[in-house]
Amino acid sequence: MTKRISAFLTTERPATPCLVVDLAVVAENYRKLADALPEAGIYYAVKANPAPEILRLLAALGSAFDAASVPEIEMVLAEGGSPERISYGNTIKKKADIAAAHALGVQLFAFDSRAELEKIATAAPGAKVFCRILTSGEGAEWPLSRKFGCSPSTASRLLREAKALGLQPWGVSFHVGSQQRNPGQWKCAVGAAARIFRELAEDGIDLQMLNIGGGLPARYRRKVPSLPVYARVIRTAIRKHFGNRLPDVIVEPGRQMVGEAGIIETEVVLISRKSRSDDRRWVYLDIGRFGGLAETEAEAIQYPIRSRRKGRGEAVVLAGPTCDSADILYQKAEYRLPLDLQIGDRLQIRSAGAYTATYASVAFNGFQPLRCYCI
Ligand SMILES: *Cc1c(COP(=O)(O)O)cnc(C)c1O
C-alpha cells in the first residue's frame, strides 16, 4: 500500500467498500512500460478502469487508448484524448456504433470476421482496419478463450478482402490472455502475425501495425516475471520474425497500468463457524463477487488481502455480503487472517485497481456500485 493511500484511508476514513487509486502509481506504471518498450505506442485499455482522472492523466502523459464502445470513446475524448489516437478494439460492434465512432473521428477499427468487416466498410468507409487472430490463452490467469480472433489463414484472406471493400488493411492484433504469466506466449503470436504480413506483402499489400494486445500482469499473490523480462521476450520475437522490416508496434495494457495502483478497503461484516468442529472460520466482507470482485470467479485472480492486526494467522473462507451462493471469494485457495480479527475491522484488498469498479453490479441486493477515489 502506498503512503498516499494509507494517509487517505486514515484521514478520510471513507465508507466501505471503496477503491482508492494512487495516480502517482499509474504515472509510474506508464513510464515503466514506455521505458521497457520504447518503440511501442501505448494504447491504454479503457475497460480496466475508466475513471476520468486516470484517462486525463494518461492522455496528458501521451497515451493513446483502446476503447470497446462509443461511451468509452466519449469518455476518452472528454478527458483530453484525441480521436486519431483511439483504437476501437472490440471485434463485436453495432453498425450504428461504428458510424458514431467514425463521426467522432476514430479511424482505427478491429475485426475478426467477414460480417464485421462489411459493417465497417459501410459505416466507416476508408477506415484503417486490423484483424485479430486467435491465441491459445494458455498460461493466462484470466484467459480470453475463443470468443475473439480468427485463424491466421482467415485473417490473411479477410485483410485482402478489406482492401477490395475500400478499407485500409492496417495490421494484425492478438491478445495472449489477461494476467499472462508466461512471456513466451507472445513468441508464437508474433510469429503468426509476421507470416500474415509476409503473405500480404506478396500481394502488394503492406501492413503497418502489429498490435501485441494486453496481458501484461499485475502482481497479485502469485509471482510473475518482471516487466523487463516480458519486454525482452517480445522485442526479441519481433526482431526475429520481422527482421529489418519492423512494423509499428502498439501495446494495450490494462491490468499492468492500473492493477497495482488501487486498493479496496472493505469491512468485516461477520465471522462464523459452521459447526464447533469446523476448522475454518467464514469471514464475510462488505464486498464480494457482485461488488467488484468478479475476477475471483473460479478463484482465478487471487488478490493479496491484509489486516492491520498482527495476531497469528488462521485459514479462512472469504465470502461476500449478498444472498447469492456464488458470492464466495476464496474457498479452495488458502487465505489466512489473524485469529484476533473482529467484526467491524477493515481489511485491504491489494492490487485491485483493474477490473473492479466497473465490474460492480448496479444494485444487486441493494448494494451500491463500488466507489472509486483517485488521489
Ligand atoms: C481487455 C483488453 C486489453 C487489456 O488487457 P489486460 O490483460 O488487462 O492488459 C487489451 N486489448 C483488448 C482488445 C482488450 O479487450
Image (tube, rainbow, N blue to C red):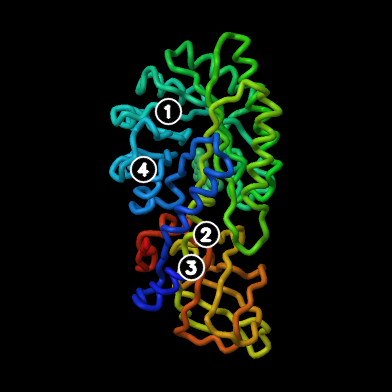
Question: What SS does tag 2 mark?
Answer: helix
Query: Disc 3 or 1, which lies upstream in sequence?
Result: 3
Please give the residue where the numbered disc 3 appears in the rendered image. 2
Label 3, residues with CA under 10 Å away: few <14, some 14-19, many ≥20: some
From the viewer's perspective, is the residue at label 1 or at label 2 nearer?
A: 2
Please give the residue where the numbered disc 1 appears in the rendered image. 108
From the viewer's perspective, is the residue at label 4 or at label 3 nearer?
A: 3
Q: Nearer the viewer, residue 331 or 212?
A: 212
Q: Compute the Cα span from label 1 to label 2.
A: 29 Å
* Residue at the (36%, 22%) spot, across then down: 124
Q: Compute the Cα span from label 3 to label 1.
A: 37 Å
- Residue 3 appears at what percent x and percent y? 46, 70
From the viewer's perspective, is the residue at label 4 or at label 2 nearer?
A: 2
Q: Nearer the viewer, residue 113 or 224?
A: 224
Label 2, residues with CA under 10 Å away: few <14, some 14-19, many ≥20: many
Please give the residue where the numbered disc 2 appears in the rendered image. 260
Please give the residue where the numbered disc 4 appears in the rendered image. 72
- Residue 249 appears at what percent x and percent y? 55, 31
Ligand 1 under 8 Å from disc 4 Cβ: no
Question: What SS does tag 4 mark?
Answer: helix
* Residue at the (41%, 55%) spot, across then down: 358
Query: Disc 4 or 2, which lies upstream in sequence?
Result: 4
From the viewer's perspective, is the residue at label 3 or at label 1 nearer?
A: 3
- Residue 243 appears at what percent x and percent y? 68, 23
Residue flagged by tag 4: what amino acid is it? Answer: Glu
Q: Compute the Cα span from label 4 to label 1.
A: 15 Å
Could you tell whether 9 is left or right of 298 in the image? left
Query: Disc 4 or 1, which lies upstream in sequence?
Result: 4
Question: What SS does tag 3 mark?
Answer: loop
